[in-house]
Image (spheres, rainbow, N blue to C red):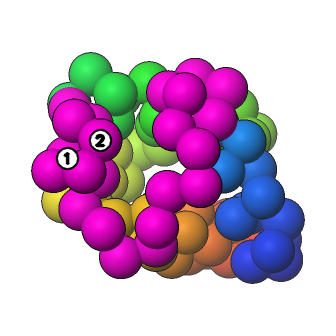
Amino acid sequence: MERKEIEKHILRIFHDEFEIENPENDIDLREAYGFDSIDAIELLAEIEVFLGFELTLDEKKQAMEISTLGQIYDYVENLSNSRD
């Protein structure tokens, strides 16, 4: 999956699910937008739908360390590439 497609879809999730418009790539989502663990769980569910597979427990644990949009892009890109 191409990076541009991932970025576009993640931005759509942020807009539709969290009402966050144009988040910056390197801003801490927790500090800037009040993004909390419940939001992270919802985001992971949306990522699973987008990728078409369920994440492992280890993959979900890795995601809990993510704090920026750029890290989310990297995470989803790595997941996509690891399952291709």
Please state which amino acid type lies under the numbered disc 1. Arg
Residue stretch in magenta: 14-36
Q: Is residue 57 visible?
A: no
**Image check: 36 left or right of 72?**
left
Which dot marks residue 57? none
Instruction: From the top left corner, tell me how far across and down residue 19 is, in percent.
Output: 54, 28
Indicate whether residue 27 is drawn in magenta: yes
**Image check: 81 left or right of 20?**
right
> Vertically, is 1 above or below 49?
below
What residue sits right under mark 1 in the picture?
A: 30
Residue shown at 75% from the left, 77% from the top: 3
Q: Quadrant of residue 37?
A: top left
Residue shown at 81% from the left, 74% from the top: 4
Task: Give the crowd class for mark 2: few <14, some 14-19, many >=20 residues within 10 Å.
Answer: few
> Vertically, is 78 above or below 80?
below
Instruction: From the top left corner, tell me how far across and down residue 30 is, in percent.
Output: 19, 47
Picture quarter with the N terminus: bottom right
The alpha-carbon separation of the residues under discs 2 and 1 comes to: 6 Å
Q: In front here: 46 or 60?
A: 46
Disc 2 element: helix
Residue shown at 36% from the left, 76% from the top: 26
Please state which amino acid type lies under the numbered disc 2. Tyr
The answer to whether the residues at label 2 and label 1 have Cβ atoms under 8 Å apart is: yes
Q: Is residue 81 visible?
A: yes
Instruction: From the top left corner, tell me how far across and down residue 69 is, in percent.
Output: 44, 64
Instruction: From the top left corner, tell me how far across and down residue 11 is, in percent.
Output: 66, 51
Q: In front here: 37 or 1?
A: 37
What residue sits right under mark 2 in the picture?
A: 33
Picture quarter with the C terminus: bottom right
